[in-house]
Amino acid sequence: MTRADRRPEAPLHKVADAARDNWADRLSPPALLPYVRLARFDRPAGAWLLLFPCWWSMLLAQDAAGQTLPNLWYMLLFAIGAFVMRGAGCTYNDIVDADFDGRVARTASRPIPSGQVSKRQAFAFAVGLSLVGFLVLIQFNWTTVFVGIASLGMVALYPFAKRYTNWPQLVLGLTFKWGALVGWTAIADRLAWPMLVLYAGCIAWTIAYDTIYAHQDKEDDAMIGLKSTALHFGRQTPLWLTGFFAAALALWALAGVLAGAQSGFFIALALTAAHFAWQVATLDMDDAANCLVRFKANIQVGWLLTVGLTADLLLMALASGGLR
């Protein structure tokens, strides 16, 4: 018997891993609520973590090009694209993992395993979200369109990674941080070393924060035969986290140097280093609530670097005497 089988207190009309009284539970029409939950619109942390590398890469490319005004239109397009494509990806993941989700306490109350939505309905919903994402993507240059489409293979493979490898978090990083490539090409219309180094740093960051997240499910995952870095690292997790967070910082710093980033970015990196140190020092791997708080805290990392890169552009504007 899994922990999911021992949780009669988790009713089907609630989602166990969603915040109590979230906006969707309060405001969404009942007919739409299962789809809002499928897309995780009630739990937007993952969408923010998908979005930030798009913004970072775009702003870094603008920094490299000597532009002094953030492209707000592109930032909005990336925001829409990140939220709908994260929704499509989560829906596809839930279709593939429906049988496993029904056997894990945290996920058993999700729309598909709880019977609120059929797999066919979920598939149609995922297709609809993907079409919206494609309409967003074609607003950019053709290089960006092709780079964006190239991510679909990784998206398709990711749900199966946890069945065959101890490193599904690496596959997630490769998939989830593809925006670091898309953001740069949207501005520069070409591939370049700074964006590749930024992407590598984002992958290391993802492995770290998603290992923290995976510690919530380690007992159930071990029971049903799924793999994760949380299980693979075990009690050595803090040491591994320190290594991956340090790698992310070093690679992001190198990307900044290669792109000619200014002081705002490097100040933000220093603050990010302190944030990472806090995550590792205060992590309780056996407390699911503790892990979830530290996972979600990575949104603050996203904002730190976004503000730092934006400050770079504005400082250049002041130095050059105008915005452009």
Image: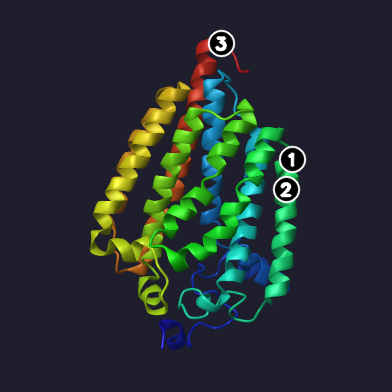
Dots 3, 2 in contact, CB < 8 A: no
Q: Do the residues labelled 1 and 2 touch (CB within 8 Å)?
A: yes
Question: Mark 3 or 1, which is nearer the eye?
Answer: 1
Quadrant of the rendered image containing residue 249: top left
Q: Name the residue under label 2.
A: 134
Question: Looking at the image, is 136 positioned above or below residue 158?
Answer: above
Dot 1 corresponds to which residue?
A: 138
Point out residue 299 in the picture as x, y percentages from the top left corner: 46, 49
The residue identified by callout 3 is 321
Is 61 situated above or below 121? Answer: above
The residue positioned 45% from the left and 85% from the top of the image is 7
| Residue neighbourhood size for the residue with mark 3, other residues' Cα within 10 Å, grouped as few (<14), some (14–19), many (≥20) | few
Calculate the distance from the C-alpha at mark 3 to the C-alpha at mark 1.
34 Å
Indicate the position of residue 146 as horizontal and vertical percent values: 67, 40
Residue 308 position, x and y percent, is 45, 31
Q: Disc 3 vs disc 1: Cβ atoms closer than 8 Å?
A: no
Instruction: Report the disc number at residue 271.
Output: none
